[in-house]
Image (tube, grey):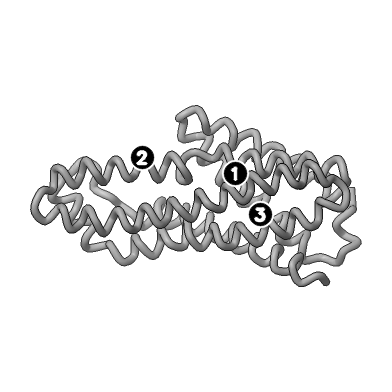
Amino acid sequence: MNKLQKAGGVTALLEACIYISAFVFFGVFWSFPTGADAGQQFTFLAENQIIFSVVNFIMYVLFGIFLAVVVLAVYERLKLSSLTLSKVSAIFGIIWVGLVIASGMIANIGLSAVLKLSENDPEQALIIWRTISYVVEGIGGGNEIVGGLWVLILSIAALKGKVFHKTLNILGVFVGVVGILTVYPAEIFTELFGIAQILWFFGVGITMLLKRESFHKQ
């Protein structure tokens, strides 16, 4: 088994696990006091800075590092049957890698900076923190257009070249379309993209860990 394909399979499964962990953390354990005043909000952030920073690192930076391996592994698989589309998809994949990693770094550096500022001017710090949150959401947290284009184009290439199972490729087309629809500021599209991509990453990961012959089943 090609080592890159195996690495791509393992990292794709890890991507799905990171998605699930993020849903669980923010859905069950994270209770940010949005209705509280600035002082209370920053007290909460200061008390939870370490765990929040670790979660941001895993959710963005580590996710982006794993994603780079998946992008390269999928490109290597697709280029044999659809070179042009695989190149285009890889371009969007690498751009997405950069945006995701940048989001995590901005979030963690921004958190540290606003916590220091909040000691003297919590109201101004809150304004800056909201601005940072908008930037993070805009380039990697809530806008999934680039990621959607990556999955959509590579799924079309896989359909044409009969790479991966047809059902997985159709799911990929769905994931890609939903990702592009996140241009509209509705939370449902972002959540649907995340849930669908969990299934897609699992499918890609399992498929890439199978023997070479399994990649061309329809």
**In the structure shown, which secondary structural element does the residue marked by tag 2 occupy?**
helix
What residue lies at 86% left-to-right and 40% top-to-bottom?
Answer: 160
In whole angstroms, how far apart are the C-alphas of marks 1 and 3? 12 Å
Numbered tag placed on residue 147 in the rendering = 1
Numbered tag placed on residue 201 in the rendering = 3
Image height of 59 relative to 179, above or below: below
Q: Nearer the viewer, mark 1 or mark 3?
A: 1
Quadrant occupied by the N terminus: bottom right
* Disc 3 packing (10 Å; few <14; some 14–19; many ≥20): many
- To which quarter of the image does residue 2 belong? bottom right
Left/right of residue 117 with respect to residue 6 in the rendered view? left
Q: Amino acid at mark 2?
A: Tyr
- Pick whichever, 91 or 20, lies toward us: 91
In whole angstroms, how far apart are the C-alphas of marks 3 and 2? 27 Å
What residue lies at 86% left-to-right and 66% top-to-bottom?
Answer: 211
What residue lies at 68% left-to-right and 50% top-to-bottom?
Answer: 200
Q: Amino acid at mark 1?
A: Gly
Q: Amino acid at mark 3?
A: Phe
- Pick whichever, 193 or 155, lies toward us: 155
Report which residue position mark 2 lands on.
134
Q: How many marks?
A: 3
- To which quarter of the image does residue 126 belong? top left
Mark 3–mark 2 CB contact (< 8 Å):
no
**In the structure shown, which secondary structural element does the residue marked by tag 1 occupy?**
helix
In whole angstroms, how far apart are the C-alphas of marks 2 and 1? 18 Å
Left/right of residue 149 with respect to residue 55 in the rendered view? right
**In the structure shown, which secondary structural element does the residue marked by tag 3 occupy?**
helix
Q: Position of residue 96 (x, y in %)?
A: 57, 48
Of labels 3 and 2, earlier in sequence is 2
Q: Is residue 107 visible?
A: yes
Q: Is residue 37 visible?
A: no
